[in-house]
Amino acid sequence: MRGITRAGLILVAILAAAAAGLAAWSPLPLAEWLRDPRAAFFYAEGWNPYPVRLLRPMPAPLSAMAQLGKKIFFDPGLSSSRRLSCASCHVPRDAYGPAGALPAMFGGQALTLQGVRAVPSLRYLERQPNFGIGPDNAEDETANRSTMPPRGAGAPRAGKTAQNSVNAAAGLVPQGGLFWDGRADTLQNQALIPLSSPFEMDGGSVAEIAARLARASYAPAFARLFGPSVFSDAQMAVAEAMFAVARYQIEDIDFHPYTSKFDFWLEGKARMSPAELRGFLVFNDPHKGNCAACHLDRPGADGLPPLFTDHQFEALGVPRNPALAVNRDPSYFDLGLCGPFRTDMKTMTQYCGFFATPSLRNVARRRTFFHNGIYNSLQQVLDFYDFRDTYPEKVYPDTRKMKPDMYNDLPQRYRSNVDKLDAPFTGTPSGQPPLAAQEVQDVIAFLGTLTDGYRPPGGT
């Protein structure tokens, strides 16, 4: 009996030593092992200990309307240059975002006019809510985040964290809509704006766009769908064309495939590397990256995959981009929600400098970041979050007083709108950047798991 007891004790000691070694190696803190050893073990091995079943769209043949929309989407003949289509800036192989690192694309009749904002991706817009200012919605609150933006100029704010949802209901939060300033509510309206913009496709007036549609190779299919007299009403013809483009974006699952490694990890079908897992933990740490406060990474109770955005707007104070032609004018400022392209909110100055929080899905494939395209790599983006308020001289240009000109892409009177409450902008008690160099690399590794097209082992 004593021998069995001694052997048992030896076995327990061996297992304890192995567990201690695994806990020491694991990116999870010891307290997490003590709280839930089983979950901690799965995390330490790179697996999701709480797998879920995600609801994804099922492939189906495109309707006749969506097929027409696809032809319109890829038609450069609708532009004044006859060289620019929707797909020229929203490239399918680049997750329907821009193909290169230009801060803004060139358009117009000779493709010499530079745009003013970075091209966003068209993926994952099918669940985008309409623009509005009001309390947080129920879907967001189930995803463990909290916001309390100002009710008016000078109103106090409550911070956003990846773990806290207590104060969410009280704030009036700008959210939803399409474009960096949320000025379009439907994919139909979103498609028309670049088509008619003089520095984008430059299609001209509604009458000119309708005339181009009537001359297109797909005009007979257009007439079969909407009737032979459709081109006699230019407004109706253009509206139906844009509706067809919207149907294409909604029906073709290539616009919302949900096939990233992270999606499969959520389902327990993929395993994160140690760096990816460490990055995931930093992403969700309210005292570190706090990224999940705005870029929600939890599936909803309905089983829909996370979109990695809360659809809200933030003033981050990114530096001015001298590579944008419009910025050669020192008096020009892009104020997001309150102008220059939105005009209905120009008097709501508490929102000047606010821009939409984009989805982070496929972010590792982008080469242009933030609304003004100031950065060209995720390293630069993470450095901005790390150094903006701890070492601003690494982010902003020096003034003649040898002091960084912080938030220099906003007029002085609106710089108080910039978020200074939420981590990582709060820094650390020591005054050092919240993320160490290795933690930055780990977050970048995790962001790589959000790229579509992952094939899990076994093809499940």
Image: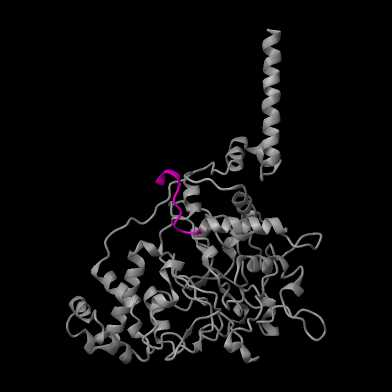
In the displayed structure image, the side of residue 328 where residue 84 appears, left or right:
left
Residue plotted at (31% across, 91% down) = 207
Query: How far across and down, in percent of the image, does residue 266 sit?
Result: 49, 48
Query: How far across and down, in percent of the image, does residue 110 sit?
Result: 44, 91
Query: How far across and down, in percent of the image, does residue 79 sit?
Result: 37, 86
Quarter of the image holding residue 116? bottom right
Q: In this view of the protein, which residue sits in the foreground, 313 or 210?
A: 210
Residue plotted at (38% across, 63% down) = 254
Vertical comparison of 242 with 210: above or below: above
In the displayed structure image, the side of residue 285 where residue 196 appears, left or right:
left
Quarter of the image holding residue 381? bottom right
Quarter of the image with the C terminus is top left
Vertical comparison of 12 with 269: above or below: above
Whether residue 437 appears in magenta in the rendering, the answer is: no
Q: Would you say residue 307 is visible in this rendering? A: yes
Query: How far across and down, in percent of the image, does residue 365 sit?
Result: 52, 65
SS majority, magenta: loop
Q: Which residues are magenta?
A: 451-460
In the displayed structure image, the side of residue 181 where residue 59 appears, left or right:
left
